[in-house]
Amino acid sequence: MDIFLQQLINGLVLGSIYALIALGYTMVYGILELINFAHGEVTMMGAMICIAVMGALLSAGGLPAIVVLALGLAAAISICMVLGYSIERVAYRPLRGAPRLAPLITAIGMSIVLQNTAMLIWGKQYLTFPKLFEPQRYEWAGAHVTSLQILIVVLAITLMGALLLLVHRTRLGRAMRATAQSPELAGLMGINPNTVISFTFIIGAALGAVAGVMVSAYYGLAHYYMGFLLGLKAFTAAVLGGIGNVAGAMLGGMLLGIIESLGAGYIGPLTGGFLGSHYQDVFAFFVLIVMLVFRPSGLLGERVGERA
Amino acid sequence: MSRATSSNKQSLLSVRDLRVAYGGVVAVKGIDLEVGRGELVCLIGANGAGKTTTLKALAGMLRPAGGTIRYDGHAITRRRSYELVSLGIALVPEGRGIFGRLSVLENLKLGAYVRRDTLGVSQDLDRGFELFPRLAERRSQIAGTLSGGEQQMLAIARALMSRPRLLLLDEPSMGLAPIMVQRIFGTIRRIAAEGVTLLLVEQNARLALEISRRGYVMESGRVTLADEAAALLANPDVKRAYLGG
Ligand SMILES: Nc1ncnc2c1ncn2[C@@H]1O[C@H](COP(=O)(O)OP(=O)(O)O)[C@@H](O)[C@H]1O
Ligand SMILES: [Mg+2]
C-alpha cells in the first residue's frame, strides 16, 4: 500500500514532465500532421542551456539562488524558442507539400545536428544540476514528497492551464484551431498559416525547455543524449492521449508517468525479483505498441479522416 | 459584350485573360470579368465549367497561370488569400466551408480575424445575429451540428464579419430545401442593398439572374456570354441550356 502511494506520486511528477513535452508533439501534429522528432532534442537543449547559464552565474557569484534559477530558466526558454522557430523554417517549411517521408528524414537529421551541437559544446560527460536549495521533505501517509516534486507538478499544471486558455480563449488560439481544422479555410479568414505554424513551434519549444529543466533538476543530471529517450516517451504520451489533441497530451503524459512508475515499483515483486525497476523504460514502449496496434487514434483522439 | 463591360474606372473587380490550371489541366482558359462598385453580378454555367476555380483564383486560393486580376485599382493577381481579406475580399466557399468543430460564435469571430476594432466587431456580431436569428439561438453550439441551411447562413454571416467590399459567393443554394433557398436569396438581396459588391456563382440560374444586374455564362473554362441579366433571361440559348426550356 505504501509503495503504491509513493509510486503514484513519483508517477505524477514524471507524468507532468512528459505531458509538457508531449504538448509540443501534439500541437505541431494537430496543425501540420507532422511528427517533429527533433522536439526531444529541444528539451535536452533546454536542460543543458539552463545548467550552463546557472553554472556561469554561480561561478561569477553574488546572485541569490532564486535569481540564478530564474535566469537559467529564462535563457533556456528563450534560446529554445529561437531553436523551435528555426527548426521549422530550416527543416520543415521548405518541404511543405513534399511527400511525408521527406520531413521525417529532415526531422531525424535535425535531431542529429542538435545532439552533436550539444556534444561539441558540453562534451560527452553528464552535467550536474547545481544544488541551489535544500529540498524540503514532507511525509504523508507513509509516502515522501519533496518540495521540488511539488514545484514541478504545480508549475506543469499552471503552464498547461495557461496553454488551454491560450488555445481556447485567445485570437491566436482560435487561429491555431482553425488552421488545424482547415488551412485553406483559415486562409480565407485572413490567417497567415506560416504565422500560426511558427507560433506553434515556438510555444511547443518553450514548454519543452521548461520540461528539460525540470527533468535535469529532478534527476540532478543532463546529457547530450537525454533528448532521445525523453522525446520518445513524450511522443508515446501524445499517442496515448490521441495525437493532435491538446487535452489528450496532458492526460497521456500523466498516465504514462503513472504507468511507468507503478510498473517499475511492482515489476520486482511480480516477477519474483527476476526483473528489477531498471526495466522502467520498457513500459513506455509497451504502451506505444499496444496503442498503435489497438487504438492508434489514442484515448481522446478522433478517428482519422474526421479532419476537414 | 460592350454592354456588359462597364467602364474600368467604376470597376471594383477587373479580370483580364485569367487562366487557371490544376497541374497540366487548364480549368479556366482566359476569361474577362468586370464587376462594378455596388453591383450584383452572377456567373452561371454547368457543373465543371470552371466557376469555382475562377472564384478560388479571385480569392487567392489558387495561383493563376496567366492573366491579371485588378481590385480597386491594385493588381492582386499573385496575392494569397490571407492578404486579400484585409483588402476587403471575402469568399463563401462551395459546400459551406465552416469550421465544423468550432462553435457558431467562434466561426463568426474568425470572420473578423483581421479586424482590430473591437467595438465595430461586436456591433457587427449583433447585426449578424439580427440578420440570422437562428444563429443567435445557436451561438454556443458546435457549428458542425447545424442544419445545412444554418451552416450556409453561418458561412455568409462569417464572411460579412470581415466587412467585405467584394463578396464572392459560391453556390449558396446548393443542396438546400426550396424555402431555405428563398431565404438565402433574400439575404443576398439585402447584402447587395447595403452596398456590398457581389459576385454570385449559382447553378440555380433563374434565381441568380433574377436578382442580378448583369450575368456571365461560363462553358468549359470560357465565358461564352456576358450581358444584362434581363437580356440573358430572355436569351433563347440561355433559356434552353440553363433555365429549363
Ligand atoms: N482540385 C482539382 N484538381 C484537378 N482538377 C480539378 C480540381 N478542381 C476542379 N477541377 C476540374 O476543373 C474543372 C472546373 O471545375 P470547377 O471550377 O469546380 O467547376 P464548377 O465550379 O463550374 O462546377 C472541372 O473539369 C474539374 O474537374
Ligand atoms: Mg463549383
Image (cartoon, rainbow, N blue to C red):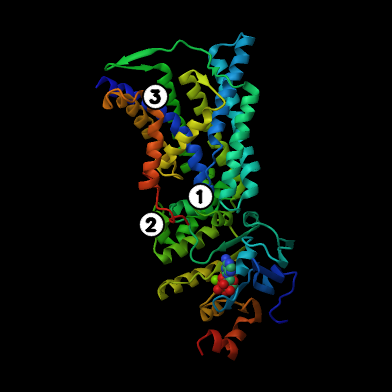
Mark closer to the observer (2, 1):
1
- Decide which of A95, B242 is in the foreground and name it: A95
Q: Secondary structure at mark 1?
A: helix
Q: Which residue is mark 2?
A: B137
Q: Image quadrant of ligand 1?
A: bottom right
- Mark 2–mark 3 Cα distance, whole angstroms, equals 58 Å
In the rendered image, residue A304, in percent from the top left (x then y), is placed at 43, 53
- Mark 2–mark 1 Cα distance, whole angstroms, equals 27 Å
The relative height of residue B140 versus residue A3 in the rendered view (above or below) is below
- Decide which of A302, B223 is in the foreground and name it: A302
Amino acid type at circle 1 is Ala
Question: Which mark, by number, is residue B155?
Answer: none
Identify the chain of the residue marked 1, using the numbered disc in the image: A
**Numbered marks: total:** 3
Q: Which residue is mark 3?
A: A278
Amino acid type at circle 2 is Glu
Q: Is residue A151 visible?
A: yes
Identify the chain of the residue marked 2, using the numbered disc in the image: B
Is disc 3 in contact with disc 1, using a CB cutoff of under 8 Å?
A: no
Amino acid type at circle 3 is His
